[in-house]
Image (tube, grey):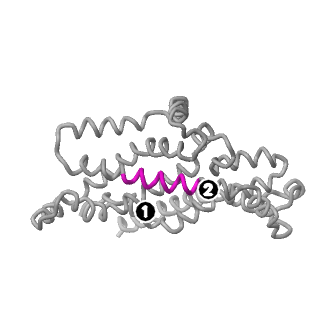
Amino acid sequence: MEEIKKSKIKSRISWSIAFILATFYLLISILPFLFMVLNSFKEKFEMLVKGVFELPDSLNLSNFAGVLTGGFWNYFRNSVITLAISLVLLLTIAACASYPLARFRFKLAAPVYALIVACMSIPIHITLIPVFKMSQKANIYDTIWALIGPYVAFGIPISVFILTSFMKEIPREIEESAEIDGCGRYSMFTKIILPLSKAGLSTLAIYNGVNMWNEFSFAYTLTQSIQNRTLPLAVWEFQGQYSMNTPMIMAVLTLSVLPMIIMFIFFQDKLVKGMTAGAVKG
């Protein structure tokens, strides 16, 4: 009985510590967002007169109206187009590369996989000048198409690494049964492996989508005109234009992060499933 009581006490202490740490992490995570949203509804000098975490005097929507009429939709459209095309290409290439590495047995499997994983260590910033020159020679500089290549290329190593490990956990008995039924390699990939890898693909889509949505270096280097720039540069442009109007900048930031928050709310279950898939073998 004493051992049971001690184990219950230890369990309660552990849960209490975990709850305190989780609450502390929640506060750290939500306070910047709360600061941003509250101040986006305030007047220009209201932040200086009142506290930054105090509620605004009124629901002031003029900041959002000014942002939306100031070219924000152009940045938003470019980000959506770039993100959609890049994600489709990235997930297609990663799935096609991960399938043979995970399911086929050939001598170059290990070296090719090691080479792809080694590419994860390449710093993005050392490639800015070569990619800039390549985009100029390809006549795609200062277009959203110049961003798609780097986004896909730098997303492939981590995507192949995760998706290969995910596909290795799929039981081989499923493939053997499909082969007995006359299923070919192509049909097996499209009708069996891909549907069973939806959780992993969803995780990669969210992970890479957030990185592409927030990417600044390539967007700043490979685009010049306002009509071809993406949302991270909108924040930069508006910050220079409204440097003395902090609530306006907060409104830009709120509108910029809102799509990613909405996407996470709708797809958080798929993200959790993808992260935990394969952790327990049945």
Horizontally, residue 274 falls left or right of residue 184, namely right
Which residue: 29% across, 64% down? 196
Look at the image and say whether residue 52 sits in the magenta stretch: no
Locate residue 165, reporting x and y percent: 30, 50
Q: Residue furthest front?
A: 139
Look at the image and say whether residue 89 sits in the magenta stretch: yes
Q: Is residue 16 above or below residue 130?
A: below
Residue 223 image-quadrant placement: top right
Q: Secondary structure at mark 2?
A: helix
**Residue type indicated by callout 1:** Val
Q: Is residue 130 above or below residue 172?
A: above
Nearest-to-viewer mark from 1 and 2: 1
Horizontally, residue 269 falls left or right of residue 98, namely right
Which residue: 21% across, 37% down? 108
Q: What numbered label is drawn on residue 239?
A: none
Instruction: Read off the residue under disc 2.
Output: 29
Q: Residue furthest left?
A: 180
| Nearest the eye: 109 or 39 | 109
Locate residue 221, reporting x and y percent: 61, 37
Instruction: Read off the residue under disc 1.
Output: 272
Which residue: 25% across, 46% down? 101
Q: Secondary structure at mark 1?
A: helix
Horizontally, residue 142 falls left or right of residue 162, namely right
Locate residue 198, reporting x and y percent: 36, 63
Q: Is residue 2 above or below residue 217?
A: below
Q: Which residues are magenta?
A: 79-92
Which residue: 51% across, 29% down? 130
**Contact flag, marks 1 and 2 (Cβ < 8 Å):** no
Locate residue 57, reporting x and y percent: 86, 68
**Residue type indicated by callout 2:** Ser
| Nearest the eye: 53 or 98 | 98
